[in-house]
Image (cartoon, rainbow, N blue to C red):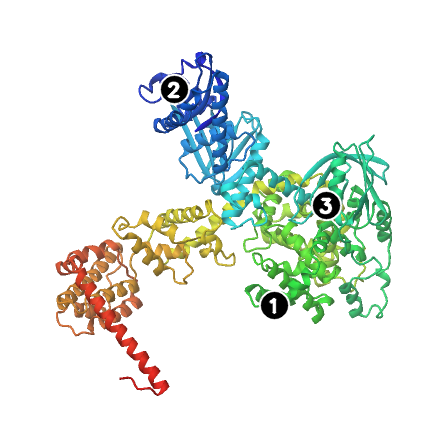
């Protein structure tokens, strides 16, 4: 490998290097302890030194130095792992450089020419290899060590590497941690003791930062039941971020079959870089904090002050600029942030150079002043280039009543048509919000502060709920960026028939059936359109139970198109991975909830050590945002908080509910009693500020006399208590807990899936449970290997998330051939590729080019009755017309009879305690008939078929490949048949003559038909 020329003082290196060959301008050296005479104490010391110092010599013990006769300075220009490799470089120098150097007069010119030539070679290699790192020279050296030490496929992409210590028990091993696309690898060498560790990202159960008495700060990795600890990092947070990103990338790509079409930096596993992962992490954090569409990426960040007019002071924070949005978030604890769509910006005033300030003017006669911006001119130009787009569509004004909510009163006869109910007219709560709008602004560029959260906790007016939901969720930006999208997708989706649409139709009338808005065809039709449109938009999710309940509530307060975009925001941004077959997102948040219970409700954990009960009972809380357990008029207040604070609001409320019922839960004797306590509590949660009359509100208390004796709890008080006790919980910490628990949840689901698959497959094959377990691990790993280095493998292109768990892991032909060749006894015979192909086609019953685990096991297991009968038929048909046909038929009859008797004896030996069961009389008669010499031409097939029917109905039986092979080899006439040489020339002549006769017959037939059609006689 060519190296960037670096100065080396030869006298300091003489003790570690030995000269192999040299000339006037170059010298080739070998590292002491390697090659001839290597080993011993010198080899141990040099090897340890190279590993500790991160020396390239550990994997490249040969090097070439450039020298000039009148200089004491040497330059390293190449290194090699083997003598053959370094000799290739040496020969290239002799052929291409040596002759040219003689024309130079000064040694400085010679050195400059050599250095320029070497740098040119490195640049050419960099173009081919695609190395894109801050220090490509050091990265190339690290890549050389990575490839040498771990012997992974050449396609494996090294992302980055770090110096650290790996703890084996209480002994640290200093070495190097290498992070690649698919593997976490560690290497250490100390005094002859070599430590090498390779772990696949998809095998990791836990990845977290920990600390204890011995290790102040370390990274803990749990994989394959083993704990691994890494410490002594120079940049631990950076290392952990990259590890976290790679693990998440592996999970999404291998388990969820993501293709990352909208993220170019992640779309090709062969081009993953550290810079790309860090950029992706920043973009995800940026979009999550400001609730922006997934197309937005963070382009520039500026530190500045923002003048807050309602508080009359400057707040310190950061300006975050994307392609379509200008965002600001404070960093001084004021919890102030603002999102300005570029479509709302009408201009940027001339900057003030003295204070490095600029003023951004937005629609609605409002302006935002940013000061102390380091590069304010560049920021102003960037905003000017992006502003001036179309105006943002605004939500209906507060004086208009949302359609479905108005229908509720209209259907109940509480107000005449064309009027607004008194209870929906402006209240004190709405007046408070109007004051807030006048001070903080209204719409997409509104300031969000602590006061905004306080108003959310107190409650949102009915007439403003839809508008604020759209604003806080970011759905208003999604809708503005996609005008006409909903109408278009509704037209395309209506009339389609899929599994999702069938499930939607089944659940339509189960969505708030007691609410008047969904007791008419108008409400049901709107719900159908929204759910069907979303299933069409996102077929990966399609439709999941609980989406109907959530969408019903959204339709009560938002227009149909707005409800659709609210559903998009919830499913794709605020609750990722919630609404799919495995509801991974909900399970992850339940794990976070359990962790928070242990942290905040220690009294409850002391009484109930097993917290899985809370996971099962709280699942509906997370999936439906408490809508399924609370009366609708109370549940909407929870949804208000959710759209502002995200999942943090649901976690806080869950803790408050358990805290409120602490005494009852502690005194409960079993889970059923605890569930009853919580159910009664939810039935007694009311909303005193609800505009609906008490007779209309959903209240099941009247149906439960015991519940009526319990004190009522107002939802506003419950939410306020949740924020007061647990409001210090930060959203960033919740996200970290989510990531920490996600790996464990997914691996637990994978383990459950494996058990289900093994239970089904074990009924079809004769493998033991440990054998099936090992085979499943091999099959799953082979499946992942087909996805490691490409996004275009058949298993990814044909992945269908709606398939059952048995179909989730499949192999294409190439991967099938590789794994099958490792397990089958005849894999080394000539022509095995044809055998693999035919076996694959036989197993691939649905002709999709993929084989699942059950089908693969059937191919490895013993031949079943149907397969054995087909095999016997094939032999009989193969011998038809042969001169030794009679002898061959008798041989096959003896083979089949012998196999049947062998199987019966084997079954009896396996069940020595059970009484011997006589074979069915028909089966014995058939066996004897097969073994008798007399035979008619049609007897074999008929006899075998009858035998199969009788035995298949009575007894399960099978044969091993070895049994069939041994039985066939025991018949000389069969051996002679398969070993008989074939006269190829005679066959060719026969084929040629037959082909000529066929062509003449075909031509005569065609001409005859043409003559008849045209009344022309053929002579």
Secondary element at tag 1: helix
Q: Is residue 488 visible?
A: yes
Q: Considering only order in the chain, which callout, 1 or 2, is on the residue closer to the N terminus?
A: 2
Tell whether label 3 touches label 2 (CB within 8 Å). Answer: no
Q: Position of residue 348 (x, y in %)?
A: 80, 42
Tell me the mark number nearer the camera, choosing from 2 and 1: 2
Outermost residue, bottom direction? 1015
Q: How many marks?
A: 3
Q: Considering only order in the chain, which callout, 3 or 1, is on the residue closer to the N terminus?
A: 3
Q: Residues within 10 Å of mark 2 (few under 14, many from 20)?
A: many
Q: Residues within 10 Å of mark 1 (few under 14, many from 20)?
A: some
Q: Position of residue 497 (x, y in %)?
A: 56, 68
Q: Position of residue 757 (x, y in %)?
A: 43, 54
Q: Which dot marks residue 29?
A: 2
Tell me the mark number nearer the camera, choosing from 2 and 3: 2
Q: Could you say which quadrant of the image residue 591 lies in?
A: top right
Which quarter of the rendered picture does the C terminus lie within? bottom left
Q: Could you say which quadrant of the image residue 100 lies in?
A: top left
Secondary element at tag 3: strand
Compared with 785, 50 (above or below) is above
**Residue at (20, 73) in percent of width and height:** 939
Q: Considering only order in the chain, which callout, 3 or 2, is on the residue closer to the N terminus?
A: 2
Which quarter of the rendered picture does the N terminus lie within? top left
- Of 361 and 751, the residue lying toward us: 361
Tell whether label 1 touches label 2 (CB within 8 Å). Answer: no
- Of 137 and 335, the residue lying toward us: 137
Q: Which dot marks residue 505?
A: 1
Residue at the disc numbered 3: 325
Tell whether label 3 touches label 1 (CB within 8 Å). Answer: no
Compared with 110, 677 (above or below) is below
Secondary element at tag 2: strand
Compared with 53, 12 (above or below) is above
């Amino acid at each position: 490998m060519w190296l960037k020329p670096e100065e080396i003082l030869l006298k300091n290196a003489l003790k570690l290097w030995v000269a192999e060959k040299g000339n006037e301008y170059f010298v080739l050296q070998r590292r002491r302890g390697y090659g001839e005479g290597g080993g011993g104490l010198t080899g141990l010391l040099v090897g340890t030194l190279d590993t500790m110092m991160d020396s390239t010599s550990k994997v490249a013990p040969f090097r070439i130095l450039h020298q000039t006769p009148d200089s004491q300075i040497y330059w390293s220009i190449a290194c090699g792992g083997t003598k053959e490799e370094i000799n290739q470089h040496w020969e290239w120098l002799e052929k291409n450089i040596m002759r040219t150097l003689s024309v130079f007069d000064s040694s400085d010119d010679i050195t400059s020419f050599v250095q320029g030539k070497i740098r040119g070679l490195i640049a050419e290699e960099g173009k081919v290899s695609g190395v894109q790192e801050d220090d490509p020279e050091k990265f190339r050296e690290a890549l050389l060590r990575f490839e040498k030490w771990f012997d992974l496929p050449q396609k494996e992409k090294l992302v980055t590497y770090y110096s650290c210590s790996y703890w084996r028990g209480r002994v640290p091993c200093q070495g190097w941690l290498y992070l690649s696309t698919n593997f976490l690898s560690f290497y250490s060498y100390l005094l002859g003791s070599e430590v090498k560790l390779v772990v696949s990202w998809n095998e990791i159960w836990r990845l977290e930062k920990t600390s204890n008495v011995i290790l102040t700060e370390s990274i803990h990795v749990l994989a394959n039941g083993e704990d691994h600890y890494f410490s002594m990092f120079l940049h631990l947070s950076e290392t952990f971020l990259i590890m976290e990103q790679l693990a998440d990338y592996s999970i999404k790509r291998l388990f969820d079959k993501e293709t990352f079409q909208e993220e170019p930096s992640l779309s090709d596993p062969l081009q993953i870089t550290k810079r790309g992962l860090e950029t992706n992490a920043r973009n995800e954090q940026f979009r999550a904090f400001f609730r922006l569409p997934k197309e937005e990426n963070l382009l520039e960040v500026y530190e500045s002050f923002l003048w807050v007019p309602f508080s009359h002071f400057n707040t310190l924070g950061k300006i975050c600029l994307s392609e379509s949005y200008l965002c600001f978030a404070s960093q001084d604890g004021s919890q102030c942030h603002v999102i300005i769509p570029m479509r709302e910006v009408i201009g940027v005033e001339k900057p003030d150079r003295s204070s490095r300030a600029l003023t951004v003017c937005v629609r609605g006669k409002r302006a935002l002043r940013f000061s102390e911006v380091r590069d304010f001119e560049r920021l102003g130009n960037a905003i000017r280039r992006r502003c001036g787009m179309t105006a943002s569509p605004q939500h209906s004004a507060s004086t208009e009543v949302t359609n479905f909510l108005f229908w509720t009163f209209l259907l109940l006869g509480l107000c005449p048509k064309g009027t607004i109910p008194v209870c929906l007219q402006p209240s004190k709560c709405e007046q408070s919000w109007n004051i807030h709008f006048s001070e903080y602004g209204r719409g997409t560029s509104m300031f969000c502060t602590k006061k905004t959260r306080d108003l959310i906790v107190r409650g949102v007016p009915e007439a403003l709920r839809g508008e604020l939901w759209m604003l806080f969720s970011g759905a208003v930006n999604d809708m503005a960026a996609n005008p006409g999208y909903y109408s278009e997708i509704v037209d395309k989706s209506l009339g389609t028939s899929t599994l999702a649409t069938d499930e939607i139709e089944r659940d339509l009338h189960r969505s708030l059936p007691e609410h008047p808005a969904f007791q008419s065809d108008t409400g049901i039709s709107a719900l159908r359109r929204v759910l069907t449109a979303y299933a069409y938009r996102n077929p990966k999710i399609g439709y999941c139970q609980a989406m109907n309940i959530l969408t019903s509530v959204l339709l009560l307060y938002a227009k149909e198109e707005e409800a659709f975009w609210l559903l998009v925001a919830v499913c794709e941004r605020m609750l990722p991975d919630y609404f799919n077959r495995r509801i991974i997102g909900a399970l992850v948040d339940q794990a976070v909830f359990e962790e928070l219970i242990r942290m905040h409700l220690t009294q409850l954990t002391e009484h109930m050590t097993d917290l899985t009960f809370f996971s099962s009972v709280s699942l509906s809380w997370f999936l439906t945002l408490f809508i399924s357990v609370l009366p609708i008029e109370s549940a909407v207040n929870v949804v208000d908080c959710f759209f502002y604070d995200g999942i943090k609001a649901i976690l806080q409320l869950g803790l408050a509910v358990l805290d409120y019922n602490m005494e009852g839960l502690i005194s409960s004797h079993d889970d059923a009693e605890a569930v009853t306590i919580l159910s009664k509590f939810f039935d007694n949660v009311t909303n005193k500020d609800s505009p609906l009359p008490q007779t209309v509100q959903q209240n099941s208390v009247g149906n439960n006399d015991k519940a009526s004796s319990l004190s009522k709890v107002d939802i506003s008080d419950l939410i306020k208590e949740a924020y007061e006790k647990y409001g210090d919980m930060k959203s960033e910490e919740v996200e970290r807990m989510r990531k920490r628990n996600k790996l464990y949840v997914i691996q637990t689901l994978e383990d459950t899936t494996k058990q289900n698959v093994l239970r089904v497959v074990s009924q079809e094959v004769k493998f033991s449970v440990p054998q099936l377990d090992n085979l499943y691990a091999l099959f799953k790993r082979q499946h992942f290997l087909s996805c490691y280095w490409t996004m275009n493998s058949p298993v990814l292109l044909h992945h269908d998330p709606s398939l059952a768990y048995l179909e989730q892991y499949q192999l294409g032909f190439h991967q099938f051939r590789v794994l099958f060749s490792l397990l089958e006894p005849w894999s080394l015979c000539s022509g095995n590729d044809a055998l693999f192909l035919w076996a694959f086609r036989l197993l691939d019953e649905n002709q999709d080019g993929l084989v699942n685990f059950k089908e693969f096991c059937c191919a490895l297991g013993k031949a079943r009755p149907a397969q054995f009968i087909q095999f016997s038929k094939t032999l009989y048909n193969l011998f038809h017309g042969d001169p030794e046909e009679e002898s061959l038929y008798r041989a096959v009859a003896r083979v089949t009879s012998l196999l049947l008797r062998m199987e019966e004896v084997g079954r009896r030996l396996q069940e020595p305690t059970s009484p011997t069961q006589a074979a069915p009389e028909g089966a014995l008669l058939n066996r004897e008939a097969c073994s008798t010499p007399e035979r008619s031409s049609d007897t074999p097939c008929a006899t075998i078929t009858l035998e199969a029917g009788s035995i298949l109905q009575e007894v399960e039986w099978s044969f091993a490949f070895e049994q069939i092979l041994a039985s066939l080899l025991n018949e000389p006439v069969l051996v002679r048949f398969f070993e008989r040489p074939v006269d190829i020339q005679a066959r060719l002549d026969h084929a040629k003559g037959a082909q000529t006769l066929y062509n003449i017959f075909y031509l005569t037939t065609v001409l005859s038909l043409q003559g008849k059609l045209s009344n022309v006689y053929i002579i």
